[in-house]
Image (cartoon, rainbow, N blue to C red):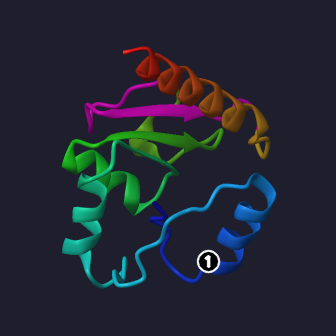
Amino acid sequence: MNLQYGECSRELEAACNQFGVEVLEDKKVDTLRDLESFAAQMAALDMVISVDNSTVHFAGALGVEVWVMLPTVPDWRWGLEGERTCWYPTMRLFRQEQRGKWELVISRVAQELTSLVNANEIR
């Protein structure tokens, strides 16, 4: 489910073409103006994965499992180390090790997500 706010149809189409996976989008919900529906969308999800933005705060406040990809020097509220935050118990932080280099962060998130999916398939 796409929770990105603003116009992003070209990016979604490019992702579908490159990875062969369609990202669902509910065009009836204006994620910037209809916060109640936006929150309802997130509450229905198993997990939210994003960079630091308002979406991760909504997901954390709703108790949804959320993984946040952070830059080397993140906003003050995330501190400078660790995978957990005192703000949201369902949140996990994935930190960039080198400024501007997202490849390792994205790779680690992909590995963790694959492990999680595989573990759930066994059950």
User: Relative to the observer, which residue lies in front, 82 or 105?
Assistant: 105
Identify the element where label 1 is drawn. Answer: loop
Q: Which residue is mark 1?
A: 8
Q: Is residue 112 above or below residue 14?
A: above
Whole-percent x, y for residue 61 in the image: 22, 49
Residue at position x 67%, y 34% from top? 105
Residue 82 visible, this orientation: no
Q: Is residue 59 left or right of residue 103?
A: left
Q: Is residue 42 above or below residue 91?
A: below
Residue at position x 27%, y 38% from top? 88
How crowded pointer 1 is (Cα within 10 Å; few <14, some 14-19, many 20+) is rated as few
Q: Is residue 114 above or below residue 26?
A: above
The magenta stretch spans residue 38: no
Which quadrant, please, contains the C terminus? top left
Residue 26 visible, this orientation: yes
Q: Is residue 42 left or right of residue 115?
A: left
Instruction: Magenta stretch: give its range.
Output: 82-98
Tell me the amino acid under the disc marked 1. Answer: Cys
Q: Is residue 37 left or right of residue 91?
A: left
User: Relative to the observer, which residue lies in front, 26 or 37?
Assistant: 26
Whole-percent x, y for residue 120 in the image: 41, 22
The magenta stretch spans residue 84: yes
Number of numbered discs visible in the structure rendering: 1
Which quadrant, please, contains the N terminus? bottom left
From the image, give the main secondary structure of the stretch colored magenta: loop
Q: Is residue 101 left or right of residue 82?
A: right
User: Relative to the observer, which residue lies in front, 30 or 12?
Assistant: 12
